[in-house]
């Protein structure tokens, strides 16, 4: 049975049962305390019932006390305002209280009348609904997210246990992608909240690379190519197809080749007979390293394109990179000519157009220049402008969470030295 009653605030307590809190909000969080203070001020101006909320809290009568089903922030605000008694909707029946608890959990995330939930609070609200056996479709509708998001959040919660409570829905969805991979799940579970996107990007890139290599190996074997574990005597690396070159393997298989290949962490390397049939282990290793580097460098360039492309619509996800690229755009020839002709200084304000112009105007070392500088110590082809651009770009992207590959890191280190030498010359 449901009744409206005037209750004493001293008899009211937050609802907890089996370690499940009804309210997903953290009432001790500074932002929530500020919100509670704002509510308290609003309640003081309630002319009909001074010191009380206009929307009645929902309570469950448990013997001689009341437990809060919905309205914990209002309860905290009333305490702050000095309210001693307030009107509430009270339930006596446990089944009705459970139903009210479900409806309150849905209301917590679906109403715009309350303070907007943080991403963490929204996630807790969804998890609370799932713990209370609210159907996934209803939970999704209340949270205004797709049903697939709720399903993945449920699966991830099973994987990480109590740690899920402080995770956002998008982090839980990322964990669900690696369901069954204990090592990957552990990395995403144990990393800091600010780092999980970078960890997820690295894990996803590794998985996609492994899947691409496996697909190429399957195609090569179907075409009669012998895929071996290491380069055999009398052969050297000819060409490596990395993750982003996988589409070109069909044409290569249709032509003439030696019929042998090596699967590596970078991709699939096709082999050719060594010159004169000589067996030079050092030459084999060097050829393989070069082929791998070329494939990795090409893959890194495409990975950077994809990373920027994913964030271009919302520059808040790449703040440092956007600033760097906007500055490069403002320093470009077109901007300089505009300033000369009009007398107007071009401001380096980040926007999509500035990012696009800055990104396309960058000079980045090509495969040959990068390999020569890093492996052979030959910096003749690594121009100062390209070195400065690449070092600056990678530093900005790393600050925004980009996870560079080893080849990018090693090239960036050389680029910083070259850029420094150029500054010294000036």
Image: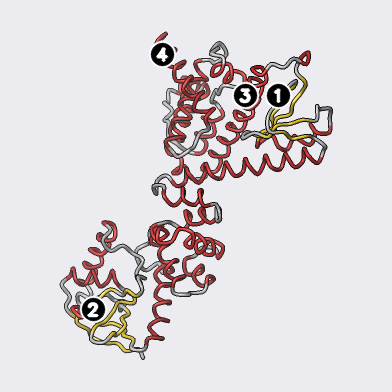
Of pointers 4 and 2, the one earlier in the residue sequence:
2
Left or right of 26: which side holds 266?
A: right
Q: Are marks 2 and 1 in contact (CB under 8 Å)?
A: no
User: Which residue corresponds to mark 1?
Assistant: 237
Spatial CA distance of label 2 from label 3 is 70 Å
**Residue at (21% x, 67% y) in the render:** 41
Q: How is the image coloured?
A: secondary structure
Q: Position of residue 357 (x, y in %)?
A: 54, 31
**Residue at (74% x, 22% y) in the render:** 235
Spatial CA distance of label 2 from label 1 is 75 Å
Q: Position of residue 33 (x, y in %)?
A: 25, 61
What element does badge 1 sit on?
strand
Disc 4 or disc 2, which is closer to the eye?
Answer: 2
User: Which residue corresponds to mark 4?
Assistant: 423
User: Which residue corresponds to mark 3?
Assistant: 289
Q: Are marks 4 and 2 in contact (CB under 8 Å)?
A: no
Spatial CA distance of label 1 from label 3 is 9 Å
Spatial CA distance of label 1 from label 4 is 39 Å
Q: Position of residue 402 (x, y in %)?
A: 48, 38
Q: Which quarter of the figure is the C terminus placed in?
A: top left
Spatial CA distance of label 4 from label 2 is 69 Å
Of pointers 1 and 4, the one earlier in the residue sequence:
1
User: Which residue corresponds to mark 2?
Assistant: 12
Left or right of 403: which side holds 113?
A: left
């Amino acid at each position: 049975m449901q009744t409206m009653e005037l209750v004493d605030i001293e008899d009211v307590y937050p609802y907890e049962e089996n370690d499940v809190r009804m309210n997903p909000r953290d009432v001790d969080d500074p932002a929530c305390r500020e919100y509670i203070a704002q509510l308290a001020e609003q309640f003081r101006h309630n002319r009909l019932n001074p010191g009380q909320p206009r929307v009645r809290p929902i309570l469950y009568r448990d013997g001689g006390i009341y437990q809060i089903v919905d309205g914990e922030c209002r309860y905290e605000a009333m305490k702050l305002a000095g309210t001693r008694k307030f009107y509430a909707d009270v339930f006596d029946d446990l089944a009705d209280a459970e139903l009210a608890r479900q409806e309150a959990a849905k209301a917590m995330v679906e109403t715009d009348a309350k303070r907007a939930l943080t991403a963490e609070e929204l996630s807790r609200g969804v998890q609370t609904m799932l713990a209370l056996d609210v159907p996934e479709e209803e939970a999704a509708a209340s949270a205004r997210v797709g049903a697939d998001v709720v399903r993945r959040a449920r699966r991830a919660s099973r994987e990480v246990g109590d740690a899920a409570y402080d995770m956002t829905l998008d982090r839980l969805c990322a964990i669900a992608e690696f369901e069954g991979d204990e090592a990957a799940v552990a990395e995403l579970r144990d990393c800091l909240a600010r780092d999980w996107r970078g960890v997820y990007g690295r894990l996803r890139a590794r998985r996609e690379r492994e899947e691409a290599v496996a697909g190429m190996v399957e195609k090569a074997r179907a075409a009669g190519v012998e895929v071996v574990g290491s380069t055999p005597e009398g052969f050297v690396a000819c060409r490596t197809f990395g993750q982003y070159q996988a589409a070109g393997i069909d044409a290569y298989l249709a032509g003439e080749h030696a019929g042998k290949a090596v699967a590596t962490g970078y991709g699939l390397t096709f082999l050719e007979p060594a010159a004169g049939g000589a067996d030079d282990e050092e030459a084999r290793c060097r050829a393989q390293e070069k082929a791998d580097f070329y494939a990795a460098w090409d893959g890194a360039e495409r990975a950077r394109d994809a990373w920027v492309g994913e964030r271009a619509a919302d520059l808040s996800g790449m703040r440092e990179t956007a600033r760097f690229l906007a500055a490069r755009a403002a320093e470009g020839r077109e901007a300089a000519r505009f300033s000369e002709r009009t007398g107007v200084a071009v401001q380096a304000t980040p926007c999509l157009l500035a990012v696009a112009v800055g990104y396309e105007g960058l000079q980045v070392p090509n495969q040959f220049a990068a390999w020569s500088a890093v492996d052979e110590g030959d910096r003749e082809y690594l121009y100062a402008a390209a070195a400065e651009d690449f070092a600056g770009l990678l530093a900005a992207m790393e600050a925004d969470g980009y996870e560079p590959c080893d080849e990018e890191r090693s090239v960036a280190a050389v680029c910083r030295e070259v850029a420094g030498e150029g500054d010294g010359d000036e």
